[in-house]
Image (spheres, helix red, strand yellow):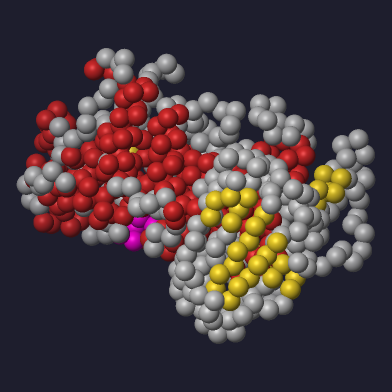
Amino acid sequence: MVETTTWKPKLSLEMQLSPLSLPLSAKIRCNAVAKAGKTPKGKVGTMYTVEYHSTVSYNSLAPRFALQHRSPRALVLSVFKMPQITGENSRSNHPRQPKTLIFAQKVLRMAPFTLFLLACSLASQLQGATPSPQETAVQVDQFLMQELFKDVSPGELADTTDDQTFLRRVWLDLAGQLPPPEQVILFVLDKDPTKREQLVDTLLSDQRFGNNWASYWRDVILYRRTEERAIFSAQALTDYLSDHLNANTPWDQVTSEFVTATGNVRENGSAAVIMAQGGRPEETAAELTRIFMGIQIQCAQCHDHPYDRWRREQFHELAAFFPRVAVRPDRSAMQRTFVVVANDRPARRKRKQNNNNRRRGTPEHHMPDLDNPSAEGTLMVPALFTTGQRLELDVTDAERRAALAAWMTSPENEWFSKALVNRVWSEMVGEGFREPIDDLGPDRETRAPQTFDFLSRAFTQSGYDIKWLFKTITATQAYQRQSRARQNAAEVPFAANRPRRLRADTLFDTLLTVLNVTEQSLGGRRNPARRGRGRNGPRAVFNKLFEYDPSEPQASVTGSIPQALALMNSAAIHRSARSGRDGGLASLLQNIPDNQDLLTEIYLKCLAREPSPHEQTTCLLHIKQTQNPLQAFEDILWALINSAEFQYRT
């Protein structure tokens, strides 16, 4: 069976793989015809390459492929849309880089399955227009109703949350900060039925969206680091992610850059994943798979996976994509730093035995012999653990990792889209379709599997549009329901939005807003060295105490006694909360003489809502009974900062 899709390009390349099940040593029959523009020249084995020496215009290279397969599921290969490229190494003329390497120069040198993966990674371009977030949200709720809520009594499903709660929730979820008090009032008074949708659009276009979610992904990548010096890459990683998230760079491109990264870790944030694992093939392969596919294959490193189908050989075939990666110190830099490099040169000397790092940065990967640990082990060929398709051993590091990135981000790889959908859904709704969120796989059960599949496919169809995913989730009833903690394990999933403890960065930024102080001022007057933004700055110190692993289920994330004591007894917080000239209450006390109005303003700043009648009565009575009213307001502010409502997103 042969299926083809044809365009009218300036240069037409027709390739036939017959069939894919042949060994990878089988030849590719390649017929290149120059209809216009440059003429193919030069050969690599039996495969043509095309050399360009001048600018290639957009869409001037659109190959036509014919794929032959014995299976009736032969895929239609899509057009490769080439942005403007000047020379082989140009990466600056268009924000959407090709999936792997410059097509005409290098792709034809790869093994047949790499061409297949490249086509899969581009197939989403043929799937039609991006689905509407609002329409998709309605369908998600319909799927949930059929799968989970069909037999649920009305009282079990939480009602839609009020405007004040929604406003605080979506500000914390998207921007990582509390809304200004005046916006709380304006939002409640606004009668526009589309105001929630408009608010989401506004926050997604705000720079704070990228900053907030960059800190989330920084914690995902660095929290489980095995190389402590990876902290050097933290700022570059945060900046890199913030830029891409705010620019709405498609998630497949971001992921591909993490997989294929090289360079100085203080300058190239995408090198952080490899740096976090010290460039070791096993750890790097396992962590990339966990983060970007939600599959924990590392349990198969020493033995077959006890709960999944993955075998030990499959794990080491995956690790065989990374043996030529190395992390080395950059001695030419002014600051202490490291670079991720490719080492395609043959080993110059025999690797030392009994060295835990003996396979790092060497040409090929060997699976250790458990019966004879001092032996070199079994030579492993790079292969994809879900398909079994293999690369040849003589391909370069760049080609290996480009092929892996193309497969990981392919629409045919359902776990790529599911991993991100499950993470974002869990963070926004409070519980995931599967928990832990980084433990997906074909042998794992999920909640509402049809809903999960539908939303993941829609995300793929969107072109891995990150902001599209946030718009869709925030528009669902599941997201907009009132918040309540899960009472027992048997409770229906997604019947309410679950409370979530604020991440360290979000809590720190919230404190800065409420106290009306700068980050440097929290460093203290007596210790200027701790007033900067480095690893000993106030934010870094705060994060060390309040950070948690964002990949852990929300139900397992709880506060600690040291955290509670820090908020209650922090000299910096006490100083900033005072009503004196340098405190956060100073301007409020000067501008709002009425106690009731001032109380309302403090509640709006801290909790993004007005006090309830009971709270208002209690607080006004405390103010009246206190001999010093200013001290009373300091007490109220301190109490709100230490409340569970302040420290949780509800």
Q: Is residue 645 above or below residue 4?
A: above
Q: Residue at x 33, y 34 (%)?
A: 140
Q: Is residue 517 left or right of 162 when viewed as pictured? A: right
Q: Residue at x 30, y 39 (%)?
A: 137
The answer to which of 223 and 101 lies nearer the viewer is 101
Quarter of the figure that contains the C terminus: top left
Number of numbered labels in the structure image: 0
Observer able to see residue 145: yes
| Residue 365 on image: x %, y % | 80, 52
Q: Is residue 305 left or right of 205 when viewed as pictured? A: right
The answer to which of 547 and 114 lies nearer the viewer is 114
| Residue 409 on image: x %, y % | 54, 51
| Residue 15 on image: x %, y % | 63, 61
The answer to which of 136 and 30 lies nearer the viewer is 30
Image quarter of residue 324: bottom right
Chain part drawn in magenta: 206-211
Kindly give the residue lying farthest to the left in the view shown: 594
| Residue 176: in magenta span | no
Q: Residue at x 44, y 41 (%)?
A: 456
Kindly give the residue lying farthest to the bottom in the view shown: 54
Is the magenta region chiefly helix, strand or loop?
Answer: helix
Q: Is residue 111 above or below residue 93?
A: above
Q: Is residue 216 left or right of 204 when viewed as pictured? A: right
Q: Residue at x 39, y 59 (%)?
A: 248
Q: Is residue 93 left or right of 604 when viewed as pictured? A: right
Observer able to see residue 272: no
Q: Is residue 32 above or below residue 300?
A: below
| Residue 550 on image: x %, y % | 49, 42
Image quarter of residue 48: bottom right
Kindly give the residue lying farthest to the front in the view shown: 1
